[in-house]
C-alpha cells in the first residue's frame, strides 16, 4: 500500500502563515476589547444620563402640571425605571461573571473503555472537560474567555458594553438591564411623543430644549429597536436553557442527530418555567415571580459548577 502524497510545501507554508497571523490578530483584537471596555461603559452612561436629564428637564414639565397626581405617577414610574437601569448595569459591570473554584475536580466518572486522554474527553453537551489555556478541568457549561484570560462559569459572551464577561453570576442583572432599558426607551417615546411632534412640526427658532427632546426621542427609538432584538434573543435563550455559546454547539449537535435519525435533547432544558426560575429566581423560593424583576444582592442558585 503506497503512502499518501505529502501536501505541497507552499500549501504547508501558507497554512502555517494563516495560523500564526490569525493567532496574532485575535490576540490583538482581545487586547483591543480589553482596552476599550471602559470607553464603552463611559459612552453608555453618558447616553443614558443624557436621555434621563432631557426627560426630567424638558418633557416632564410639559406632559403634567408640577405637583399634580399625574405628575407624581410619571415621576414614580420614571424613577423606578431609571434606578433599575443603573442598578442592573452597574451590578453587571462590577460583579465577576464566575470563576472556576481553585479546588474544583471533575466529578464525572471517566469511560473505562475510552482511549482518549482526559484532556480530550467531553461533557455530555459536547464541550471539552479540560481547558488547555488554564490547564485545569472545566465544569459543565464553562468556557475560556480570551479577553478576561480565565474560564467563566456558564459563560454567555464577553460584552464590551459592560467591560466584563456575562456568565453565571451576572447574567440575571445583564438580562434585567436589557429589559428595563427597553421598557425605559418605550416609556420615553410614549411620554415624549407629543412634545417631539410639536418640535418637529412647528417652525421657529431651535432652542436647547428642542434639541434635547428631538435627540433623546431619536436615541430612545434607535436603542429600543437594537435592545429589543437582543432582549428577544435572550428571552429565547432563557426559556430554552441555553447560552449564546451553547446555542451554536446545539445547532451542530441537532444537525448530527437529524442525520442519524435521532431526536436532539438539550441536557439542561427542564421546562420553560423552571429554566426561567433558574436564571431570574433567588433562594429560597426561585418560583416567586414577583421577585424575578426586583433588585437583589442574593447570588444565583447553585454553585455554577453543576446544573
Image (cartoon, rainbow, N blue to C red):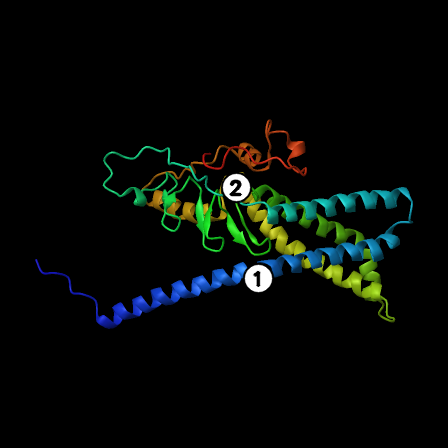
The 10 Å Cα crowd at callout 1, few under 14, some 14 to 19, many 20 or more, is some
Query: Where 33 sits versus 142, above or below?
Result: below
Which residue is found at the position 30% from the left and 41% from the top?
A: 118
Nearest the viewer among 137 and 256 is: 137
Q: Which mark is residue 47?
A: none
Q: Is residue 109 visible?
A: yes
Q: On residue 36, which mark appears?
A: 1
Mark 1 and mark 2: Cα distance apart in space: 23 Å
The answer to whether 20 appears left or right of 65 in the picture is left
Quadrant showing the N terminus: bottom left
Image point 57% across, 62% down: which residue? 36
Q: For this rendering, which residue is in front, 198 or 66?
A: 66
The image shows residue 135 at horizontal and vertical percentages of 36, 47
Q: Are marks 1 and 2 in contact (CB under 8 Å)?
A: no
Where residue 274 appears, as percent x and y from the top left, is: 54, 32
Q: Which mark is residue 168?
A: 2
In what element is the residue under mark 1? helix
Q: Quadrant of residue 111?
A: top left
Quadrant in which residue 129 is drawn: top left
- Front of the two marks 1 and 2: 1
| Extreme residue toward the front, this view | 102
Horizontal arrangement in the rendering, residue 304 relative to residue 58 (left or right) = left
| Element carrying mark 2 | loop
Q: Is residue 54 left or right of residue 275?
A: right
Residue 53 falls in image quadrant: bottom right
- Could one spot residue 127 in this view of the protein? no
Residue at image location 66% in from the left, 33% down from the top: 291
Percent x, y for residue 59? 83, 55
Give coordinates of residue 197: x percent, y percent: 81, 61
Query: Label 2 crowding class (10 Å Cα cut-off): few <14, some 14-19, many 20+?
Result: many
Q: Residue furthest top?
A: 284
Amino acid at each position: 500500500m503506497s503512502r499518501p502524497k505529502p501536501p505541497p510545501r507552499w500549501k504547508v507554508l501558507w497554512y502555517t502563515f494563516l495560523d500564526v497571523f490569525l493567532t496574532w490578530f485575535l490576540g490583538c483584537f482581545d487586547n483591543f476589547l480589553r482596552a476599550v471596555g471602559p470607553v464603552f461603559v463611559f459612552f453608555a452612561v453618558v447616553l443614558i444620563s443624557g436621555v434621563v436629564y432631557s426627560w426630567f428637564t424638558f418633557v416632564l414639565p410639559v406632559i403634567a402640571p408640577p405637583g399634580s397626581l399625574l405628575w407624581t405617577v410619571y415621576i414614580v414610574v420614571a424613577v423606578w425605571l431609571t434606578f433599575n437601569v443603573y442598578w442592573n448595569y452597574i451590578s453587571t459591570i462590577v460583579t465577576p461573571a464566575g470563576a472556576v473554584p481553585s479546588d474544583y475536580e471533575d466529578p464525572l466518572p471517566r469511560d473505562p473503555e475510552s482511549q482518549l486522554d482526559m484532556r480530550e474527553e467531553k461533557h455530555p453537551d459536547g464541550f471539552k472537560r479540560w481547558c488547555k489555556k488554564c490547564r485545569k478541568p472545566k465544569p459543565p457549561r464553562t468556557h475560556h474567555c480570551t479577553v478576561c484570560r480565565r474560564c467563566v462559569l456558564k459563560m454567555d459572551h464577553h460584552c464590551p458594553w459592560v467591560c466584563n464577561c456575562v456568565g453565571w453570576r451576572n447574567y440575571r442583572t445583564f438580562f434585567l438591564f436589557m429589559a428595563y432599558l427597553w421598557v425605559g426607551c418605550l416609556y420615553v417615546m410614549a411620554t415624549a411623543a407629543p412634545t417631539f411632534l410639536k418640535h418637529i412640526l412647528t417652525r421657529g427658532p431651535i432652542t436647547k430644549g428642542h434639541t434635547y427632546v428631538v435627540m433623546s426621542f431619536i436615541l430612545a427609538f434607535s436603542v429600543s429597536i437594537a435592545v429589543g432584538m437582543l432582549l428577544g434573543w435572550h428571552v429565547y435563550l432563557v426559556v430554552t436553557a441555553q447560552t449564546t455559546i451553547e446555542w451554536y454547539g446545539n445547532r451542530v449537535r441537532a444537525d448530527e442527530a437529524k442525520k442519524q435519525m435521532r431526536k436532539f435533547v438539550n441536557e439542561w432544558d427542564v421546562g420553560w418555567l423552571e429554566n426561567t426560575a433558574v436564571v431570574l429566581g433567588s433562594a429560597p423560593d426561585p418560583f416567586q415571580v414577583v421577585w424575578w424583576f426586583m433588585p437583589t444582592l442574593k447570588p444565583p442558585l447553585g454553585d455554577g459548577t453543576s446544573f
